[in-house]
Structures are given as structure tokens and as C-alpha cells.
Image (cartoon, grey):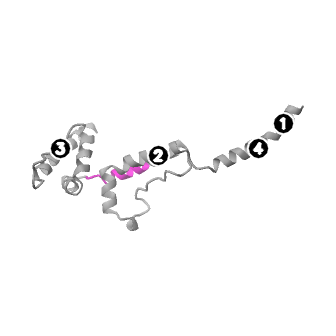
Amino acid sequence: VDDAAATLSLSPLCLDEKARQSRQPQPENKETKRTKQIGYGKATLGYVRYRHLVPPPTRAPGHPRTPRVDQRCSKRSWDGQVRKWRRGLHAWDPQSEAEWAEAAKLWPDLTRRELDRAAGGEVAVDEGADDGADLLDELASQVASFQAQSCAWD
């Protein structure tokens, strides 16, 4: 009988402990993983173009919003928020060869990395080119090749 009374008296303490734990900040490893996911999104050409073309004061409710890493939510909710954000960023990827050429001028390193990731190959860069015309021609041909491949996949 004494053991049962002791168990019953611990029950409210356990509830208080759980309530206190729920108010504590997220575990650091969870925030680290979330920060890494956000970093992957911010390292894309779509994100950089979005930041360049749409300054924060002019953003509309339908524009992509970076999820907060410190928010309390389930893994499923977090993954859904990141997925929605990343898909929204793809709307800001270059769509035409002219946009790709402009992006190559503004962010040459990022453009090469994006093309490399998308095409699954290496992007040849002529380090000796002075005016960058060779690089733009190479990028334009690789973009056209990538677009032809992506149309075949659809």
C-alpha cells in the first residue's frame, strides 16, 4: 500500500517535469541538423536570385519564407516546411538562357556549382579567359544540354 501511495505521489511530479522539459529549447543536434538543411537551400542559385530580385520590404505573402530553426514542431512538420520553401525557391531558378547568362555574370562560382549538380558532370572553366565570353558560351551550351535532358525526363 505504501508503494502504491508513493507511485501516486510521484505522478504529479512527473507531469511537472514533462511540462518543464517541453519549455526547454530544442536540443542542439536538432538545431544543427535544421541549420544544415537551411544552408543547403541558401546555397542554391534560386535563393541567391530571390534575395537579389526581391528585397525584404517588397516580399509578398506568397513568396518563400525560410523556416525558423528554433521553432518547436514535429519532424514531419519541419520536413514539410523545408520542402515547401525549397520548392518555392525553384521558381526563382533561371528559366531562359538569357537569365542563365545574367546569373553567370553575377554569380559565376554559384552558377558552375548549380550546373555541375544539375548535369551530374564537371563544368569546364577556362581560367585564362579574360572577358568571360568563353565561360558564358560554355555555360549556355551546358544549359541547353541540360534543358534537353530535363525535357526528355518529363
Secondary structure beneath disc 2? helix
Going by the numbered disc 4, the residue's amino acid type is: Leu
Which of disc 1 and disc 3 is earlier in sequence?
Answer: 1
Which residue does the numbered mark 2 point to in the structure image?
Answer: 34
Is 36 included in the stretch rendered in magenta?
Answer: no
Which of pointers 1 and 2 lies earlier in the amino acid sequence? 1
Mark 1–mark 2 distance (CA, rounded to whole Å): 41 Å
The region drawn magenta spans: 84-94
Residue 67 x/y as whole percent: 46, 52
Amino acid carrying label 3: it is Gln
What mark, if any, has residue 13 been given in the picture? 4
Q: Position of residue 104 (x, y in %)?
A: 20, 53
Res. 6 mark = 1
Q: Quadrant of the C terminus?
A: top left
Instruction: Report the amino acid beneath label 1.
Output: Ala
Task: Decide whether the magenta segment is chiefly helix, strand or loop.
Answer: helix
